[in-house]
Structure formats: structure tokens, C-alpha cells
Amino acid sequence: MRNSRSHGGLVSYLSILIVATFSTQLLPQVFAIPSSCNLFQGSWVSDNSSTSNNNIPLVYDSSQCPFINPLFDCAKHGRPDRGYLRYRWQPSACNLPKFDGKVFLEKLRGKTLVIVGDSISFNQQESLTCLLHAAVGPDSKITTGAMGPYNSNYVTFQEYGEVTIAEFYTRFLAQITTEKIGRVLKLHLINDYGNVWKDADVLIFNIGWDFIQDGENNPIVRDMDRTLAFRKALTTWAKWVDSGVLNFAKTKVFYQGFYPDHYRPSEWGQPELKDCALETEPMSGSTYPAGPPPRLSIVEQVLSSIKSPVQFLNVTTLSQLRKDGHPGRYSDAGNGFVDCTHWCLAGIPDTWSSIIYAYLTR
């Protein structure tokens, strides 16, 4: 049974909830990632595993998951094809383990996993919570609520010592202040909620790039080059990670790649198309014709400068190959909007969740 509650005292709530250190002794090792295995290098293959009706591999039924944003529920909004659910990610040198929700919850018993980032983070959180909800069943004791900035929320699985999966929405990771001239993005300062993030047992970060204004002991820069702003914000985050504020004996930190969009069909050899709206199949092979997005190299450079243990979950290429995985016209966005940025649920974010599962349960 799903209950709902809200918390105004965000910091006090998390400080009470997060009490134990992350232990590798909670369960026997269930998956070992071989040193020769790169989970992020591979291809999408047809999935002939156990299926539901219509030969669709069953991860969860989106109509039965109470956490999915209408923007991502493609089946509910009339997407006629289901072929995008018939594929699984196959690494070249090993296998990606199947997500087991009960093992995941036991591994994180009594702990909090926090996802910090832009609107794609909602895709990730909702994938995780739908997978877990399917594992424990609709009668499990689950609480939900809103907290923190715009649309940030948490889902708590009470029967597993209050395992909480939370999402903190931020487009920048950096601090935004309201001044006389308007809202100003201060790329040299970490987001105000950094003091809350630091208490989590698992932190998964990503960052957007919609940067408008910047102040760094300098005059305000309007319409700043977004690539430069992206680098500055990510560097500020990296310095925060290395500042000693995090207890790495307790907290595992991940940075989750650079999420691609599919608004430029010329990138995959179909310049006659306008966007992703007509796509129904993934790309074959293991490389994207247009190559990695330029900002991915910035992510790699900044992450390589971090001295603290941060695991890079480079889901960029595997996501680039899924031009068929977006809502397109099949969401509640309205006005004929074609969404080639976010992802259908169920869908590709469930593979991201399986990768997180592999790292947390190995």
C-alpha cells in the first residue's frame, strides 16, 4: 500500500534517516565485474528472455507503477509500437546482471540513495523506484513525499529499514541566487543543497548545460558560452567532492555520463527526418556515427582530476544508440511537442538502473 507524506524539515528528515555506514557485508557477493569487462562497451540485442504478452520482455508494467511522470509514460499516451522494449544491452566482454529488486533493497537496507541532476534524473529515479515497486509488490509499505527544490521527491521502502530513493532537481549543480537584476547562477559555488547531499549513502550526479548567467568575483556575464559554463560548474562540483565534505568510508559517489538527445537525424544518417518521432529501432553496432558529444570530453577531463573515489557510469554511447527510446509525441507535453530528450518508461533508463545495480551489489 502506498502512503504519502511531505516534509518541510528536509535536513532534519535526512539526518534522522541516514544512520548507518555502507557495508559490503550485508549480502554475499552476487556479481563480480571482471577487470577486463567494460559494461559501457557493447551493443543492443534482441531479448528473448521470459516475456509478457506480445513477446515484450517484462521488467515492469508502466500502468502499475505509481511513480511515473506522465511525460515519460509513452504506453499510456498511445505509443503504438512496443519494439523499443524488446532489446537489452549486451556488453562485449561480459554480461550485465538482471536487476533484482529485493537484492538491491537488502544491499541498501536502512540507507539512502540520492540522485542529483536535471530532469533526466527523474527518468533515473522513476526507473529505480518502478523496478523496486515491481519487486516488492503493491501491498508493500511505501511512503512518498516532496522535499527540497522544484519537484524533488523521495520514495521510501519501509520494510527494508527505510531504504530511500531520492531525487534532487538541479539544472546546474552550482548555486543560484536572486538579486536585483534577476536570478544569477554562481558557477564558483556549489548548490545550497550540498550540505544535504553529503549525508547520503549513495550519490549519483549528472549535470545539465542550460547556463545563462555567471558571477565569479567578476561582472555578471549574460548569455555566457554554455560549454565554458558547463566546465566551470563541473569543476566547482569536482572541488566540492575533493574538499573533504564527504565521508568516503560511508558514501559511494557516481557520476552518470552525459545524456544524449536525438533531434538531429543527420547524426545517424537520416537527414531527411526532422527528429526522433518516427524511430522504432535502436542502431546496430557499438558506435554512434556522429561520435560522442563534445561535452563528454569535458566530463572525462574533470573526473580525471578528482582525487577522491568517484565511479564514472558512462552511459552516453549506449544511450546514443537508442534513438527509438524517447517519448517523441507520446507524452502529456501537448502542443505537438516532440520530446527527443527524455526517455520512455519502461525503457532505456532501466538499463542505467541495471548498471547501478551491478556496481552496488558486486
Image: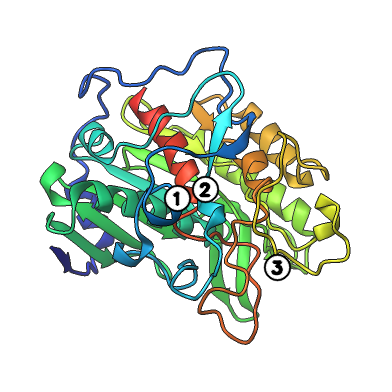
User: Which circle's residue, 3 or 2, is located before the other in the chain?
Assistant: 2
Circle 1: residue type: Asn
Q: In this view, does 102 lie to the left or right of 247?
A: left
- Percent x, y for residue 111? 24, 40
Image location of residue 76, percent across then percent down: 43, 73
Frontmost of labels 3 and 2 is 2
> What is the spatial separation of the Cα atoms under label 1 and label 2, in whole angstroms?
8 Å
Quarter that holds the N terminus = bottom left
* Residue 97 in picture, x, y percent from top left: 41, 29
In the image, which is nearer the foreground, mark 1 or mark 2? Answer: 1
Question: Are dots 1 and 2 in contact, CB under 8 Å?
Answer: yes
- Kindly identify the residue that appears in the image at 27 percent across and 61 percent down: 10
**Which one is in front, 52 or 339?**
52
The residue type indicated by label 2 comes to Arg
- Name the image quarter holding residue 359: top left
Quick one: SS at disc 1?
helix
Residue farthest bottom in this picture:
335
Which quadrant of the view contains residue 217?
bottom right
Q: Mark 2 points at which residue?
A: 86
Residue 34 seen in render: yes
The numbered disc on residue 55 is 1
Mark 1 or mark 3, whichever is nearer to me: 1
Location of mark 3 (residue) = 212
Amino acid type at image mark 3 = Ile
Q: Are marks 1 and 3 in contact (CB under 8 Å)?
A: no
Q: Is residue 212 above or below residue 172?
A: below
The image shows residue 238, relative to residue 7, as above or below, that is above
| Residue 118 is at least partly visible in this image | no
Crowdedness of circle 2 by 10 Å Cα count: few (<14), some, many (20+)? Answer: some
Residue drawn 59% across and 23% down?
Answer: 38
